[in-house]
């Protein structure tokens, strides 16, 4: 695989991880040398070799990341960082691999180092916000998304995820305007309507929640989580037959979703319709 192909493939894996990592030019780190040393190669040649070695290790890490070999990717990125302590993209991608290995605190450390090297990288702040949100740390997640939006106000994914974090904290009055703006900008995205439904559901406005869950399903009839959420709403508003139908539809779409499938099975049976 050529270097260009590897970089192209990397873009694909980063989009699947809900994290867009820009591959910037490699910065060269030069460790100090004792002038009394007698290196095997001229100092300039050694720096050039270190830079080349760091890039090669980085590309190996990208290949391993594509193959979902998280442990191997971490080792490769670590080799790249050992050769160039200022290799920002290696820290970013190693942070992704740590997160996929369920070691979020190590991912946070790598993102923090990347931000030391480039405090204006919006994608790193976005990734950091996503890690915090996945851990249930919504306040620091919101701060990270705010950093993104201060640098790039039109970063829609950061706006939407900030709304999700606010909703998780039951700050629905702040979340709803974000979701409304998102649905206006992306009317065909069912996730925006789903988020609207969840926020209204949480705030107690079941009528509007039902409206927006149905809107999400209208945009994507196979949106399993919207069917599940609608089933929950029907169950909580004493509509057992409607709830059972929604849960059964969810099970048709997601028969093997672990705990959610177990819950849907039990709730569908309870409906008795």
Image (tube, rainbow, N blue to C red):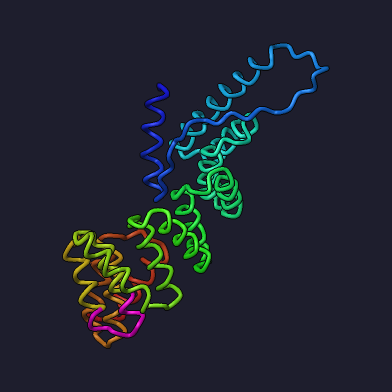
Q: Quadrant of residue 271?
A: bottom left
Note whether 222 is above or below 113 in the view shown: below
Q: Is residue 270 left or right of residue 13?
A: left
- Could you say where residue 63 lies in the image, as x and y percent from the top left? 46, 31
Farthest residue to the bottom: give it.
Answer: 238
Horizontal side of residue 1 vs 39, given as left or right: left
77 sits left or right of 31 in the view: left
State the quadrant of the C terminus: bottom left
Q: Is residue 202 magenta?
A: yes
Residue found at the very far left of the displayed protein: 218
Q: Nearer the viewer, residue 189 or 245?
A: 189
Query: Residue 181's spot in the image, x, y percent?
Result: 27, 66
Q: Nearer the viewer, residue 241 or 183?
A: 183
Could you say which is closer to the camera, residue 218 or residue 38?
38
| Residue stretch rendered in magenta on the structure | 199-208
Closest to the observer, 222 or 123 = 123
Residue 235 occupies quadrant: bottom left
Total numbered labels: 0
Asked whether residue 268 is drawn in magenta, I would say no
User: In the current view of this chain or complex, which residue is farthest to the right?
Assistant: 36
């Amino acid at each position: 695989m050529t270097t260009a192909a590897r970089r192209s493939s990397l873009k694909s894996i980063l989009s699947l991880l809900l994290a867009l990592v820009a591959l910037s030019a490699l910065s060269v780190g030069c460790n100090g040398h004792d002038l009394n040393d007698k290196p095997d190669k001229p100092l300039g040649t050694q720096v050039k070799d270190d830079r080349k070695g760091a890039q090669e290790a980085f590309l190996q890490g990208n290949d391993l990341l594509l193959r979902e070999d998280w442990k191997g990717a971490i080792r490769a990125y670590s080799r790249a960082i050992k050769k160039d302590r200022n290799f920002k993209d290696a820290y970013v991608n190693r942070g992704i691999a740590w997160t996929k290995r369920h070691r979020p605190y190590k991912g946070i450390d790598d993102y923090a180092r990347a931000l030391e090297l480039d405090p204006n990288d919006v994608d790193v702040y976005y990734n950091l916000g996503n890690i915090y949100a996945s851990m249930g740390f919504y306040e620091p997640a919101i701060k990270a998304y705010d950093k993104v939006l201060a640098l790039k106000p039109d970063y829609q994914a950061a706006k939407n995820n900030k709304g999700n974090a606010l909703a998780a904290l039951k700050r629905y009055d702040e979340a709803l305007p974000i979701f409304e703006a998102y649905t206006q900008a992306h009317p065909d995205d069912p996730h925006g309507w789903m988020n609207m439904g969840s926020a209204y559901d949480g705030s107690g406005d079941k009528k509007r929640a039902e409206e927006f869950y149905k809107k999400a399903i209208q945009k994507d009839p196979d949106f399993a989580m919207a069917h599940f959420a609608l089933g929950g709403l029907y169950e909580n508003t004493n509509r057992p037959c409607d709830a059972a139908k929604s849960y059964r539809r969810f099970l048709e779409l997601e028969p093997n979703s672990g705990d959610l499938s177990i819950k849907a099975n039990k709730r569908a049976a309870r409906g008795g319709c």
